[in-house]
Amino acid sequence: MNSTTDILKQDAHLIQSFADLNALKEQGARTVINRAEGAYVYDNDGQKMIDGIAGLWCVNIGHGRQEMVDAIADQLKQLDYYSTFYNFTHPTAAALAEKVADLAPGDLNAVYFANSGSVANDTAIRMLHHYNIRKGKPEKNKVLSRHGAYHGSTHLSMALTTPAYSEGWHCASELVHHLRAPHHWREGDGMTEAEFLDALAEDLTQSIEHLGAENICAFIAEPIQGAGGVIAAPAGYHRRMQDICRANEIKFVADEVVTAFGRLGHFFASEAVFDTTPDIICTAKGLTSGYQPMSATIVTDEIHDVISGPGGMFLHGMTYSGHPAASAAALTNIAIMEREQIPERVRTTGAYFEKLMRGLMDIELVGEVRGSHFMIGIEFVMDRATKASHPPEAEVGLKVARACQKRGLIARPLGNVLILSPTLIMDEPMIDEIEAILRDAIEEVAAGL
Ligand SMILES: Cc1ncc(COP(=O)(O)O)c(C=O)c1O
């Protein structure tokens, strides 16, 4: 095994994602994860840590499942690679497409596979552009998104993402309009939740009037905003937005990259939790539990009928779309979830996790605990009454994350917010342990501020 020093010397050539690349040059700034098993990961020096973020909201079934490794290896022995371009297909992608269509709500029956959530969202928009061109409405191409959204890091998915993530960068901003973030605690401005919901609906209605429904192809939304700070909208928000979109012939796209495959207690959250029937669902992450890179853009029969009608080519393709190894990983991952009833179990264990996390509100530094089940954000504040934030240089989220890591828990800092999105195989004693570590870490940081 290479020493941590040797690995970090090699790692100087690696560019990390979403990182202060300069700060990473400091000694001790990087963590080398070397091994993982179940709900735990181990660093290169052998420290065992609870994986409180499931890799990156993705290792839903837990790490190190031999069954997954065998399925991927068996597939590679049978067929290592073939594309799904032109007239080609292969049995594993076909079986997975049927399975995903079966799990997805409503008449979402056609699936485009790719390798990341970013590309799943790009694909949704490109597909809708193609759809509208075929319907003789090429100008119906703009997209409504929201402040606080995270939809990915390709050029288009970053344009859909909250502008806070792309300050100063040129994005396809002419295509995207950002609506208000649906965050009552921060944005509610003295309104009740019901009044705030009315204001959000009004914002959507006015934006449609301003841009013209004839110019808008889609409204895209995560059921719960994730990397924008774990923001759960007021009850009834998604259904209300969907109804306004439907009345204006604007497609409702649900970005379920994080929320699908069990994290909120269901294979898909759109219908089961949020009472919506999207025209497109994009997903990734939990689809393979991270054992292989894969995403899916799932569209309704109606959209599929238009793009597969006579007299047109669908000019979109990714070399690894429906990759055999990724398809095998997804099929086995879904089989494990069904056999072990992981989404069903999350309805109990996730509710327990949420309850314990909300209990951290008794620490003065904690301003809001939000999210649902195994998707939780904890926002730290300087003053709970005024909700005043610590300045960025106080690095409160980072300090709490480091204090957690020291105690054997990986959590993800995002400014003044700490994100928890563990594997879905947590039992109550493990959840108790996470809570105890968090409480201790937050209190230590609070005492030092
Ligand atoms: C809601 C959501 N959409 C899209 C993405 C982008 O997925 P990927 O990183 O696989 O491109 C993410 C990633 O975290 C996400 O959370």
Image: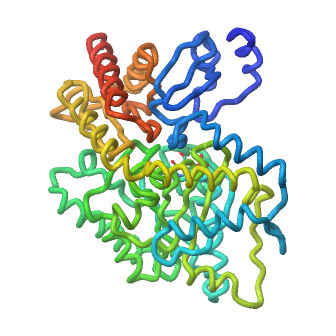
Residue 79 image offset from top left, x and y in percent: 84, 55
Direction from residue 379 to residue 299 in the image, left or right? right
Is residue 148 shown to the viewer in this render?
no
Residue 109 image offset from top left, x and y in percent: 57, 75
Direction from residue 136 to residue 366 in the image, left or right? left
Up-down relation of residue 211 to residue 361 (above or below)? below
Residue 97 image offset from top left, x and y in percent: 64, 67
Compare residues 400 and 19 and report the one nearer the observer: 400
Is residue 115 shown to the viewer in this render?
yes
Direction from residue 186 to residue 384 in the image, left or right? left
Direction from residue 266 to residue 313 in the image, left or right? right
Task: Specify the quadrant of the image occupied by residue 436.
Answer: top left
Residue 19 image offset from top left, x and y in percent: 58, 30
**What residue sits 46% from the left and 76% below the top?**
106
**What residue sits 15% from the left and 33% below the top?**
385
Indicate the colouring scheme: rainbow
**What residue sits 36% from the left and 54% below the top?**
181
Task: Specify the quadrant of the image occupied by residue 295.
Answer: bottom right
**What residue sits 55% from the left and 45% below the top?**
166
Q: In which quarter of the image is the N terminus?
A: top right
Up-down relation of residue 24 to residue 289 (above or below)? above
Compare residues 399 and 143 and report the one nearer the observer: 399
